[in-house]
Amino acid sequence: MTSPLIGITLDHEETGGYSKYPWYALRDNYCGTIAKHGGAPIALPHELEQVESYLDAMSGLVITGGNFDVPPEMYGDATVHEKVTVKRRRSAFEWAITKGALARNMPILGICGGQQLLNVILGGTLIQHIPDSIANPLAHEQPNPRHEISHEVAVLANTQLYKIVGQPTISVNSAHHQAVGIPAPGAVVNARASDGVIEGIEYPAHPFCIGVQWHPEFSITHADDKIYTAFIAAAQSYLKE
């Protein structure tokens, strides 16, 4: 059986660290977890003119997280919090590839900042900095390593995510200072933290379009693996169409 090709968005750095010249970056567990669940991962350089070619080849899209934020003007916010860092070329590419995937009903999984971008593309807004907007927030930028649990989230009943994980509460890791503000029209909140922060959204009008605020590619719990199993199964169905 042919493995569905899963496109993964890349992070981008201008200089420093790996090279003195601009370079792409992607944690290997994004790829490894897709492969473990039966997908064929492929990285997507930020070449706007290749978006349609990428989409023609792909059967699923993972919008990854990163140490940056969606530009506030993309969701109509004229203010920019001092903690906000943008990467406009990456955001422009991710906007185009995600819009294309939505138009084709291609399975989409948004992770951390990928969930936030997904909400913005669908017409929602973001909280620019959780500590300034949420009373007594959890440590959403967890101090312990990312491969460890940070806190629990409540999975809302009657959602696609609940059907996938099969339990009302799951333990997650956490590495974000922003969150969904106003959910997009047509989007459904499928998970929340105990402080009220939205931890997951889905778009029922689409066959598989789910965003989660945590990083299931670390496979910390069985729920993480179930998310990837369902996503790859959706991509396999898309491949057969």
Image (tube, rainbow, N blue to C red):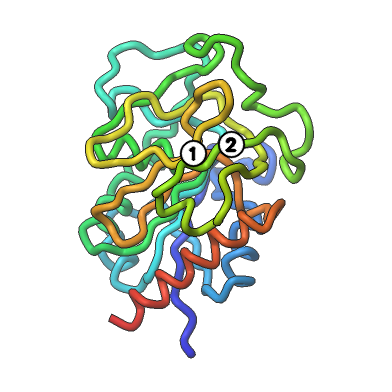
Instruction: Kindly identify which residue carries mark 2.
Output: 153
Badge 1 marks a residue whose secondary structure is: strand
Measured as percent of width and height from the top left, residue 53 is found at: 29, 68
Q: Does the residue at mark 2 contact the one at mark 1 (Cβ under 8 Å)? A: yes
Residue drawn at (32%, 25%), measured in percent from left and top? 182
Q: Which one is nearer the viewer's eye here, 19 or 87?
A: 87
Residues 47 and 162: in front is 162
Residue 54 location, x and y as percent? 34, 66
Residue 50 picture quarter: bottom left
> What x and y, as percent, mark residue 159?
40, 49
Q: Amino acid at mark 1?
A: Ala
Mark-to-mark CA distance, 2 and 1: 6 Å
What's the residue type where badge 2 is placed?
Val
**Extreme-bottom residue of the structure:** 1
Identify residue for label 1: 191
Residue 129's disc is none
Image quadrant occupied by the C terminus: bottom left
Give the mark nearest the N terminus, 2 or 1: 2
Horizontal relation, residue 133 to residue 123: left or right: right
Depth order, front residue of 173/10: 173
Taking the spot 56% from the left edge, 76% from the top edge, the residue there is 38
* Coordinates of residue 26 in the picture (x, y in percent): 59, 52
The 10 Å Cα crowd at callout 1, few under 14, some 14 to 19, many 20 or more, is many
Q: Is residue 78 above or below residue 101?
A: above
Exactly how many numbered labels are in the figure? 2
Q: Is residue 78 above or below residue 153?
A: above
The residue depicted at 31 percent of the width and 35 percent of the height is 120
In front of the other: 78 or 161: 161
